[in-house]
Amino acid sequence: MMKKLFLLFVLSACFFFCACSDKDVAGISSVETQNAFLIRVVHNDSLPAVNAVARVRSADFVRNIAEDSAETPFFMEYKTDSLGCIRIDSLAIDTAMIEIIDKGDGVIRKIHAAEVQDGDSVQFVLEKTGSLRGKVYLPEGVDYAWVQVYGIDRLVKTDSRGFYELDSLAPYDEYSLQVVIGDTVVQQSAEVKVGGETLSNVFAFEPDTVKILDFEMGKADFILEEFNLHATGYLMVTDTSVVTVPSVDEDVSKAVENAGAGREGKSLHWKSSAGFGVWSIFGIWICTEKSPCDLTKLDSVVYYVRGTGHYSFAFEALGKTNVEGKALNQDTLLTKDEWKRVCVKPSDFIGPDSSWGNFGWDAVKKTVTTISILAYDEAEIWIDDITLYGIKPSDFAVK
């Protein structure tokens, strides 16, 4: 109750000041004040925001992509007085956005012509600005996209991979965005929280293919930058009698080397010496235990491999909160000198037999956490470019 009385007092003070002063306030003569829309702008500590600039544009405004545009959109600018007040005497449009950014804090709100006509009074509190970032998936032949923000003078061009970032945005629960991707225009909304970073990807041209590993960075890493996903692979053995080169005690990046045998780039390579019933494993977490991936829509997994000996490619569900098990496809390598392309469809996985945790595809497809390559007996394996078809990058987003 006391807070309401205080706000009423402050806004009354603003009105009295604006009505009685013979000075210009916020760039408008203060003699005619009937039905003025009064705004008091304060910081989080309730102190007035003095000399803060408020910019008003149509809620439908977006900054024109063409730098030489002759467009002259609706625009008004005000500056708060010593009490943090501004007064809007009229609004030439039905709905506008008012944006105030002051020393790393900000506020943005919609205002309506009816509020101005009714002479409403409000208080805006400046809060720490946030940022908006994300990826616009670009179709073939398109090198960048434009991201426009409705109601404010913000426009950004993505990089060639589609990544963009908009910083110093006032907190707001529903920014409207317009994204221009070649000849396509996409509408989207996003929330920016106080002092936070918001992820807003644009999926209009999202591919249904994800390359899990290509090793070109010289590391055995899985990275989906647009979802802040990163995992490093590991080499392990099921028994101390199993010997691997490189050793499981070494950094797994030592297993990444030139692909060789006529193939460009890098690949993963290790040797394994194991007895019957034990093996070595290269594994990598592609989804978390708490947010496993549903790969029900998987059409196939494709990879390139060469070497000698027996191995399996497997999807696994791991973690205490999941029913642990795997779905695997077995293969035999006959030569180190030639790469072969392997395509594994869900129907190619061995049926459930419970041997060494093989529960089959249907048992694990909705809770996949890990990809594993298992090397049996005496084996030497080079593997590269593991790609999932029928799966979108957003299928990996943490839920």
Image (cartoon, grey):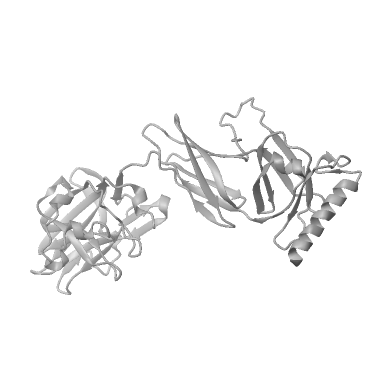
Describe residue 95's horizontal placement relative to residue 79 as left or right.
Answer: left
Total tally of numbered discs in the picture: 0
Q: Nearer the viewer, residue 260 or 314?
A: 314
On the image, the x and y values in percent for residue 15 come to: 83, 50
Which residue: 67% across, 28% down?
72
Residue 127 can be seen in this image: yes
Residue 82 can be seen in this image: no
Which residue: 56% across, 31% down?
65
Describe residue 186's horizontal placement relative to residue 264 as left or right.
Answer: right
> Is residue 399 positioned above or below 135 on the image?
below
Q: Nearer the viewer, residue 123 or 230?
A: 123
| Residue 338 figure quarter | top left
On the image, the x and y values in percent for residue 21 come to: 90, 47
On the image, the x and y values in percent for residue 251 come to: 30, 64
- Residue farthest toward the bottom in the current orientation of the protein: 240
Question: Quick one: quadrant of the N terminus?
Answer: bottom right
> Is residue 237 positioned above or below 201 on the image?
below
> Is residue 167 positioned above or below 282 on the image?
above
Describe residue 321's horizontal placement relative to residue 117 as left or right.
Answer: left
Question: Quick one: quadrant of the C terminus?
Answer: bottom left
On the image, the x and y values in percent for residue 288 come to: 34, 62
| Residue 281 figure quarter | bottom left
- Residue farthest toward the top in the current orientation of the protein: 70
